[in-house]
Structures are given as C-alpha cells and as structure tokens.
Image: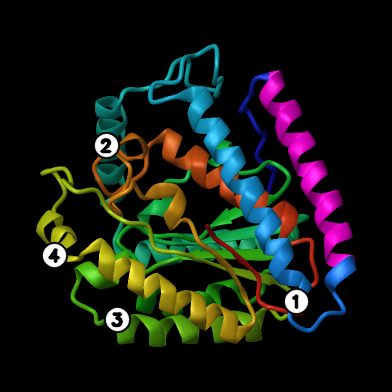
C-alpha cells in the first residue's frame, strides 16, 4: 500500500510558528518533567499531556483563524480539487457518496474491508495506522490524513460498537503501530443504553490489546451534533433525542475506561463543540458529518497527538484533552 502524499500546503509563517512552538514546548516540557519526575505528587505523564494540550489548541486555533469559514484556493491547495466547496456542495457530494455506497450490503462491506486488511497484512507497510469506526471515520479524506503514516480505513457507515467488535478479527494478521477508534453515536441513536456502549467499549479495548500487544490504541471521544441537524438526515429525530449532555457524560466514562485499561484517550469534544456544547456549524455539512474544515481540525489533533504521545512509552494511560 502506498503512503498517502500530503497535498496540504500551509502558509510558511504558520509552518514556522507551529514547528517552533512544537520545539519550544517539547524542550521545556522535558526539562520541567525531569525536575519533578521524582516527586510522587507530580507524575511526568500528566505534565506531558498538559504541554501537548497547549500545542494542540494553539495549532487548531491558528488553522481556524488562518482559513476562516471559507478558505480560499491561495490558502489551501488540495489536489485534485481546484477550489473549496461550499457547505451545500459538500453536503451534495456527501449525499452522492452515501447513495453509491448504500448499494453495498453490510456483509459486502465487511468482506471488502477483510480483503483490504489481508492485503495490508501481506505487504506489511511501515507505520501502519488503522482508523476504525463509522461514517465519520469512513469519509476522512485520504489526502488529509497525516502523510508520515500508512493508513488503513476500516470504517463502515452506520456502524455500531457491537458491529465493530464482531469484525475486529479481520485485523488479526495486521501489525499496526497504532489504532484510532471512534464509535458510539449510532448506538445512541438506535436505542442502546450508555451501559451497553461502555461494556462493548471494554470488550473492543481488551480484544485489540490482546491481538495487538505492541500497538498503541487510541480511543477518541464521540463528537457532538449540531442544534439543528439537516432535515435530509434519515435519523434526524433520533439525533435530536440524543442530547449532547448525554454524549459528554458518556465520553467522560469512556475516558475513565481508557485510563483503567492503560490505553490513550484523545478528547476531540473541546475542538468541535461550541459554547453551548453543539457541533460547530462551520465544521459540518449537515449537523452530524464533517466538512473539509472539520477534517482539518481532526487531522491536526491526530497529528499532534501522534507526535507527542505515540512516541512516548505507554507505561501510563495518556490523555490529550482541553
């Protein structure tokens, strides 16, 4: 599998600032950690998480401030798209994709992903990283995924935590460096209880740890939805019935499970939620799925997390949150 080339071209000043900020935080965080690591009240991993969080927020703020709600072609150059799409155009493009993919049954989807996993297991690419989840992960533009990794997307539109658990065996022969999991919103809209979702999360984590003991497992928070999801969404009412307060509470429980299991937790909610806890309107096509700018924010979070967390020994659970 070929590595995805990174077509994102950012302004030089942003690049220089981000690199300098990263270097400054890493150097000074290391010195600070060495100074307090022997003190029982100040675990070193906690300060590393704090430093990573500062960098993540700064990077995302810069991206949003730089590109605004309607990035121009001179600011973002992404091939093969010549110019950025409007929200309406993005929603229409997403609807077209979804319609074409709906021709596949769930079992056909699983078979397709199984063949892809076998091909990757045979080729053994460097720095293999797996995305596992539902439509949010499935439609992550491949050209926006960090290019320093080889990505295998094992996501299915409409997937639930139970469905993901049942097909984890497809990955048994792969040797990923990291696995990023985001799952749960479809469970909630289909009537599952919080406890059922949490029980399945524990099983997913346990199975991945057992099958891939050398891999870094990163559990990501469930994203909120907007205050007024698009009327075209078939499950619009179920989405509205699932409050963002419930999603926030569930995310806190998922974070606890991740810490108890000794795996990493990436809290995306502060980056995607507005002051009232709803999905920010400038990051979504329909109130649930993400637009290109939304994926840019997610990309920044994954890239920063990978640089600062995945390179560290996994002796303690690692959390990046706001």
Residue indicated by mark 2 = 96
Question: Which x, y percent locates residue 256?
Answer: 50, 80
The image quadrant of residue 260 is bottom right
Name above or below for residue 240 compared with residue 187: above
Give the camera-side residue of 39 and 108.
39
Q: Earlier in the sequence, mark 2 or mark 3?
A: 2
The residue that disc 4 covers is 241
Q: Which mark is residue 194?
A: 3
Spatial distance from mark 3 to mark 4, Cα to Cα?
14 Å
Q: Can see residue 268?
A: yes
Rate crowding at label 1 as few (under 14), some (14 to 19) or many (20 or more) other CA atoms within 10 Å.
some
The residue closer to the viewer here, 66 or 54, is 54
Counting from the top left corner in percent of width and height, residue 154 is at 50, 61
What crowding class fits label 2: few (fewer than 14 Cα within 10 Å), some (14-19), or many (20 or more)?
few
Q: Between disc 1 and disc 2, whose residue precedes?
A: 1
Q: Residues within 10 Å of mark 3 (few under 14, many from 20)?
A: some
Residue highlighted by disc 1:
43
| Numbered disc 3: secondary structure | helix
Q: Marks 1/3: CA distance?
A: 31 Å
Viewer-proximal residue among 121 and 161: 161
């Amino acid at each position: 599998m070929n590595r995805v080339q990174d077509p994102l071209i950012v302004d030089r000043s942003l690049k220089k600032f981000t690199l300098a900020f990263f270097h400054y935080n890493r150097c000074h965080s290391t010195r600070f950690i060495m100074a307090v690591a022997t003190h029982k009240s100040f675990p070193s991993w906690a300060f590393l998480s704090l430093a990573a969080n500062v960098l993540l927020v700064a990077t995302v703020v810069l991206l949003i401030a730089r590109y605004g709600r309607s990035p121009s072609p001179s600011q973002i150059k992404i091939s093969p798209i010549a110019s950025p799409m409007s929200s309406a155009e993005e929603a229409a493009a997403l609807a077209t994709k979804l319609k074409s993919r709906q021709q596949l049954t769930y079992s056909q989807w699983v078979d397709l992903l199984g063949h892809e996993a076998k091909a990757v297991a045979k080729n053994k690419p460097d720095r293999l990283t797996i995305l596992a989840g539902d439509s949010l992960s499935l439609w992550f533009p491949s050209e926006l995924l960090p290019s320093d990794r080889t990505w295998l997307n094992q996501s299915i539109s409409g997937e639930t935590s139970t469905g993901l658990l049942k097909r984890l065996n497809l990955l048994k022969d792969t040797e990923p460096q990291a696995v990023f999991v985001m799952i749960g919103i479809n469970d909630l809209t289909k009537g599952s209880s919080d406890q059922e979702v949490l029980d399945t999360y524990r099983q997913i984590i346990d199975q991945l740890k057992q099958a891939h003991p050398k891999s870094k497992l990163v559990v990501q928070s469930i994203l909120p939805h907007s205050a007024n999801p698009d009327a075209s969404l078939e499950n619009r009412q179920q989405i509205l019935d699932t409050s963002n307060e419930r999603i926030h509470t569930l995310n806190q429980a998922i974070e606890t499970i991740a810490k108890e299991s000794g795996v990493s937790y990436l809290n995306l909610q502060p980056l995607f939620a507005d002051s009232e806890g709803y999905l920010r309107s400038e990051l979504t096509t329909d109130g649930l799925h993400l637009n290109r700018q939304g994926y840019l924010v997610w990309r920044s979070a994954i890239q920063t997390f990978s640089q600062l967390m995945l390179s560290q020994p996994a002796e303690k659970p690692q959390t990046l949150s706001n």
